[in-house]
Amino acid sequence: MDRLKASLGVLLAAALLWLLGGWLILGGPPHRTYNRTPTVVLHLLLRPSSTPTLTPTPWPSPTFTPSRSTRETGGIAVGQFVQVQGTQGLGLRVREGPGLQRRVLFLARETEVFRVVDGPVEADGHVWWYLAAPYAESRRGWAVQDFLQVLPLTPTPPAP
């Protein structure tokens, strides 16, 4: 029995030496390195038309009034063609009604052309026009005039 205990002791000591040797060969305990200089990441979100993040108040309900005499229309009138300009490639939100709280229907691309169908209407500090794309029935809605530029109509030369 004493011989068995001695053999187990020798075996245990050999196993511990083997593990200790492997540990030392592999470099001991893992070294932790910490990056002590923080990295700052800044994300900019550019929005072509103002969309506030404030929660709307339930009163009073907005009233939309024509603004023909209250504000400059930028030369825009019903029946003219306008082009989306000045969004820096981000596009213009076209909404279901005049006002910043109205649902966005689609994003009009920079240089996209529309025909002015209705307006102007002043709401939320902006002048709004109802636009319709001449090439797609589904692309119509209200947009602020700040990003619209009137396209001059060039006369078509007569046929020879």
Image (cartoon, helix red, strand yellow):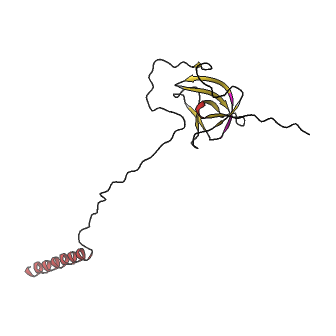
Report the side of 79 relative to 158 (left or right). Answer: left
Where the N terminus falls, by quadrant? bottom left
Give the vertical position of 82 relative to 22 (above or below).
above
Reply above or below: 26 against 100. below
> Which region of the structure is painted magenta?
110-116
Quarter holding the C terminus is: top right
Residue visible at 38% across and 51% down in the picture: 40
Quick check: can you spot residue 144?
Answer: no
Point out residue 121 in the picture as x, y percentages from the top left corner: 60, 22
Instruction: State the residue in front, 133 or 124.
Output: 124
2 sits to left or right of 135: left
Residue 114 percent location from the top left of the image: 68, 34
Residue toward you, 21 or 30: 30
Q: Is residue 111 above or below residue 76?
A: below
Q: Which residue is drawn at 62% across and 41% down?
A: 110
The quarter of the picture where residue 89 lies is top right
Measured as percent of width and height from the top left, residue 54 is found at 43, 30
Based on the picture, tell me whether residue 67 belongs to the magenta stretch.
no
Relative to 28, residue 48 above or below: above
Task: State which quadrant residue 104 falls in.
Answer: top right
